[in-house]
Amino acid sequence: MDSAPEGVDPNVPNVARMYDYYLDGKDNFAADREAAERIMKIFPVTKDAARENRAFLRRAVREVVAGGVRQIIDLGAGLPTQGNTHEIAPEARVVYVDYDPVVCTHGRALLARGEKVDFLQADARKPDEVLERLDGMVDFGQPVAFMMLAILHFIPDDDAYGIVGKLRDVSVPGSHLVISHAIDAKPDTTPQAIEVYNQATAGLNLRTHEEIVRFFDGYELLEPGLVFPKDWRPDGGETYGGGTAIGYAGVGRKTGP
């Protein structure tokens, strides 16, 4: 990107712009690229994992829209970088939510704003406040899909379970919860990664498969269940990378009260 929107400091790395860099986007600065390169040295599969995660997002969005959902809330959205939700499902009402004012300022500058897409600055760690502010922007009497892609990396366990519970309680049958989350395959590398991420955002929370399953309490896991993102290909056989993704992803549907 040639210049920064007002309020954005291009000299401070930002995780959302680092992710954009992994996806070969153009909405990043030198500081973001330097931090991203450091992470890729710690986790060589990071770029492939980001692409697999984006492929997972594309198919998950198509699945929930095919299931009748026309409202999608992307919590901890980061930047609306290439291939994001409103581009995949233009017929759906999409609200991106992120607490970082830098991301929100930059995100609004990137969005082609219209009736069906918006960007809300709010802290997902305060679900009551988020849901209150979303009321009126979406109709909670109708099915909604909550996307929580990568955000749980940066939320402590107790807070994460409470947030997911709030989303479950406000959802009507036919709603969905879409989650992706990193798994720590090499514990000795975690302190190095946290050191990099702490320059831009909170530290990492890496969990086991069993811990992640609990986030889907109250939701029916859809096929193929909880998987590595690379194992759930988008329609058309599109694939990315060849490395082992450092995370799990899953889609759950609410079928009862």
Image: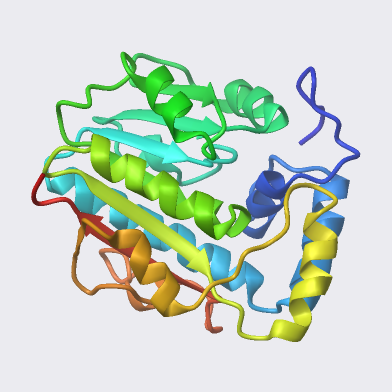
Task: Give the residue displayed 64% in from the left and 77% down from the top.
Answer: 45
Q: Is residue 101 above or below residue 28?
A: above
* Furthest residue in direction right, as rendered: 11
Asked if residue 224 lies left or right of residue 257, the reply is right
Q: Which of the pair 170/1 is nearer the observer?
A: 170
Task: Give the residue displayed 27% in from the left and 45% down from the top.
Answer: 168
Q: Is residue 95 visible?
A: yes
Task: Give the residue displayed 80% in from the left and 27% down from the top.
Answer: 8
Colour treatment of the image: rainbow
Task: Give the residue displayed 38% in from the left and 62% down from the top.
Answer: 56
Q: Residue 79 falls in which quadrant of the image?
A: top right
Q: Position of residue 131 (x, y in %)?
A: 38, 27
Q: Is residue 117 above or below residue 36?
A: above
Please state the total of marks drawn on the protein image: 0
Asked if residue 222 lies left or right of residue 84, the reply is left
Quadrant of the image containing the N terminus: top right
Q: Position of residue 96 (x, y in %)?
A: 47, 32
Q: Position of residue 3 (x, y in %)?
A: 82, 27
Q: Residue 190 falls in which quadrant of the image?
A: bottom right
Q: Position of residue 224 (x, y in %)?
A: 23, 74
Q: Residue 26 falls in which quadrant of the image?
A: top right
Q: Is residue 25 above or below residue 243?
A: above
Quadrant of the image containing the C terminus: top left
Q: Is residue 238 visible?
A: no
